[in-house]
Amino acid sequence: MTKNEHDEGLKLARLFMVLSSISPLFVIWAIKGNSLIADSYFLAFCGFMVIIPNAFLWWRIRTARKLHEKRTIVVGTAEDHRDHLLVYLFTLLLPFYSADFSTWRDFLSVLTAIGFIVFIFWHLNLHYMNILFSLKGYRIFTLYPSLDGNPLTGKNTFVLITPRVAVNNGEQLVVYRLSDTVFLEMDE
């Protein structure tokens, strides 16, 4: 790893956060059903893929609060990324809703495509993309640190999940760490 690369920690947390971000797809599939797999197995699988990753996300937030895993970050500039949620909805949920599981080949191809999406979300650090945050009124901002001349700051961007509608340049925020690059600001 070169000195310009950043190794994102909390790999298990990131994986479960990615899986929780695709959990609405499994809700849709559970409602839709299929003709290939018996409902009892398919519903159990879909339920597992909804409940376990979201329970882990809730546990990670609870743990961060309990252990006071707080960081103070200074905002250089902030970009609102509501558009990421639209991209997420159109690239993930809509195409897979129409997926037909009439053969094992169809089913395996869809699972392979989901595997690719999980890999891309993991690799690009898009593990903050969760519709549940949006439903609770939270917004997503990419924060660029201030360029203060310090060689140790201003190199990595961060993602802030917050109930705020705007984040001001130069503002200091006390936030909970969900992963090395994703922070959550909560009303206490």
Image (cartoon, grey):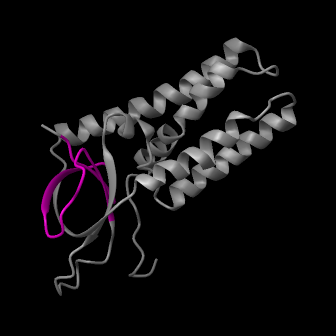
> Compared to 47, does 78 lie above or below?
below
* Residue at 58% in and 49% down: 118
Position of 155 compared to 50: left or right? Answer: left
Q: How many marks?
A: 0
Residue 115 inside the magenta-drawn segment = no
Along the line of sight, which residue is nearer the eye, 123 or 141?
141
Q: Residue 3 appears at what percent x and percent y?
A: 38, 82
Q: Residue 40 appears at what percent x and percent y?
A: 68, 12
* Residue at 55% in and 44% down: 89
Quarter of the picture containing the C terminus is top left
Residue 168 inside the magenta-drawn segment = yes
* Residue at 25% in and 34% down: 62
Position of 54 compared to 91: left or right? Answer: left
> Compared to 40, does 153 lie above or below?
below
Q: Quadrant of residue 36?
A: top right
Q: Confirm whether residue 2 shows in the render.
A: yes
Q: Confirm whether residue 179 shows in the render.
A: no
Q: Residue 43 appears at what percent x and percent y?
A: 63, 18
Q: Residue 65 appears at what percent x and percent y?
A: 19, 39
Q: Residue furthest top?
A: 40
* Residue at 16% in and 83% down: 148
Magenta span of residues: 158-186
Position of 117 compared to 131: left or right? Answer: right
